[in-house]
Image (spheres, rainbow, N blue to C red):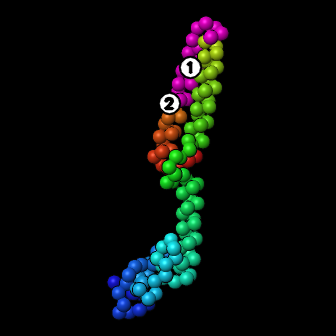
Amino acid sequence: MECFTHAGSSAVGVCQVCGKAVCHSCVVDAGVAIVCSEVCAKEAVDLHEMNQRGKKIYGIGVANPRIPSGVIAWLLFAAMFGGFGIYQSVVNREPEWFFLAFAGILIVIAIIAYRRAKETGLQC
Ligand SMILES: [Zn+2]
Ligand SMILES: [Zn+2]
């Protein structure tokens, strides 16, 4: 592969922004990527910044991703109905199956939501 600007010089890499081949004399190290010019260097830094923010928003590459908020909501509902079910069971001296079963279903939904969130890598 030849340099895009200098015919005859063999390319050492490809600009990460515009895709042009660059040789030793015109390659620019933008810090985050190898680019062909100062214009592309700025673009590369912006793109890198955008990627980093995107990763944070979606929790990509986070060592200890927090539990998705949707899952927390389901678990809260489950705790509410489960707690009420247990309370009613104690007060009435017989299991309040409706609320206990409902809490169980909510926990299953929470687990499904958690698995789906893990699969897609989304944190919401
Ligand atoms: Zn370029
Ligand atoms: Zn060149």
Pointer 2: residues within 10 angstroms few (<14), some, or many (20+)? some
Image location of residue 93, percent across then percent down: 61, 6
Vertical position of residue 66 compared to residue 93: above or below: below
Vertical position of residue 33 compared to residue 23: above or below: above
Front residue of 49/123: it is: 49
Residue occupying the point 60% across, 42% down: 69
Vertical position of residue 64 compared to residue 25: above or below: above
Type of amino acid under label 1: Leu
Image location of residue 19, percent across then percent down: 44, 78
Front residue of 52/20: it is: 52
Vertical position of residue 51 compared to residue 90: above or below: below
Image location of residue 76, percent across then percent down: 62, 31
Q: Which residue is mark 1?
A: 100
Pointer 1: residues within 10 angstroms few (<14), some, or many (20+)? many
Q: Which residue is mark 2?
A: 108
Q: Which residues are magenta?
A: 90-107
Residue occupying the point 50% across, 71% down: 32
Judge from the rendering whether residue 81 lies leftward or rightward of residue 17; answer left or right: right
Judge from the rendering whether residue 82 lies leftward or rightward of residue 121; answer left or right: right
Tag count: 2
- Mark 1 or mark 2, which is nearer the start of the sequence? 1
Type of amino acid under label 2: Val
